[in-house]
Image (cartoon, rainbow, N blue to C red):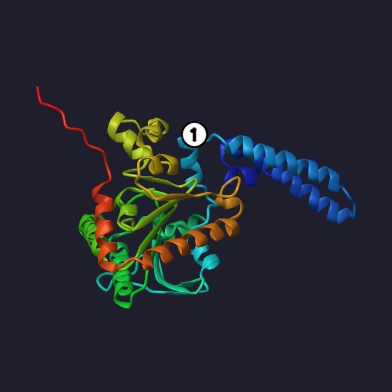
Amino acid sequence: MAKPDSRRWGSNGLEFERSIVELEYQIESLKQFSSGENIDIAVQIESLEKRLDEEKKRVFSNLTPWQRIQMARHPLRPRTLDYVERIAEDFIELHGDRRFGDDKAVVGGFATVDGRPIMLVGHQKGHNADENVQRNFGMPHPEGYRKGIRLMRVAEKFGLPVVSFLDTPAAYPGTGAEERGQGEAIAFNLRQMARLRTPIVVVVVGEGGSGGALAFGAGDRIYMLEYSIYSVCPPEACASILWRDAGKAEQAAVALKMTATDLLEQGIIDGIIPEPLGGAHRDPDETARRVKTKLCEAIDELEAIEVTKLVAARYEKFRNIGRFADVDAK
């Protein structure tokens, strides 16, 4: 029996996935051997596939918050353009903020999803080191936020619903970004999305980190993929602030309540889109199908609402987020 490919495991696997990766490689090796040698070993392959299914169920039935964060950051996880390729009949990408430049960490443009014309905006990470450098690891600069809201206002002008895909670690923490007004750009987006007179559907497909995600997150309906995360800041940053120790990120992940289940319980999101067994990266096509189904349902529901009521309900949705307690001062 061939040993698991250590290069494949080392570059793409997570520690808690190791047993699954090993079984997947064994099945792949047997299939190649059977094809090359013209030997029927279907029974052995079927047995291993059954073991693989059982192992996936065991591993993914009770992931910790930190393991879910690792899933959201998985190097093979589908990115925004991967979903666009699978759910849209066409896509015309638009560029630039009309002020400074074109931020490649943000993509957007006209698309058609199951016959429905939409404006799509989303963060874009890379699939390898070179692409991540080009895309700034999915962390937008101010011009990225301004490009996104420019496209949303175009959508409003033409009566198109907006679909926003969130997948960013955080806003880019660079000097240039601050010099070009990053805080103002994020705040402007929040204000404009709150009053945008067209439906907005948000899907967190990977990391929803900090103001970098929130700048595109003020939607009428907010959904999260099962193993995505959404938080005020990354756990490493939280640990550095609270305990002066980024090594306590796993502890911070629990305290932040950043998983899809946590956020649904708190009423911050409207629903969870289940991922295929083992995560979105193991079956991107099925994951995209599920995202597309939810998007179409949400768009149809929101387009049936009169626009003034839609905007008012969006405002109330965000005003009602959070819990407060009145106490007597002593």
Does 122 sit left or right of 244 as displayed? right
Toward the viewer: 160 or 18?
A: 160
Q: Which residue is drawn at 24% across and 71% down?
A: 99
Does 30 sit left or right of 187 as displayed? right
Q: Residue at x 61, y 46 (%)?
A: 277
Where residue 318 appears, as percent x and y from the top left, is 27, 51
Toward the viewer: 233 or 243?
A: 233
Q: Does residue 275 show up?
A: yes
**As drawn, 95 above or below 11:** below
Q: Quadrant of residue 142?
A: bottom left
**As drawn, 54 above or below 110:** above
Spot the residue most to the top: 330
Q: Residue at x 42, y 53 (%)?
A: 223
**As drawn, 152 above or below 312:** below
| Amino acid at the residue labelled 1 | Thr
Q: Quadrant of residue 47?
A: top right
Toward the viewer: 14 or 151?
A: 151
Q: Does residue 169 show up?
A: no
Q: What residue is shown with label 1? A: 64
So how many labels did they put on this image? 1
Q: Which residue is drawn at 38% across and 43% down?
A: 263
Where residue 311 appears, as percent x and y from the top left, is 26, 62
Other residues around mark 1 within 10 Å, as few (<14) / some (14–19) / many (≥20): some
Q: Quadrant of the N terminus?
A: top right
Where residue 181 appears, as percent x and y from the top left, is 21, 59
Q: Label 1, secondary structure: give it.
A: loop
Spot the residue most to the left: 330
Q: Quadrant of the C terminus?
A: top left
Where residue 248 appears, as percent x and y from the top left, is 38, 30
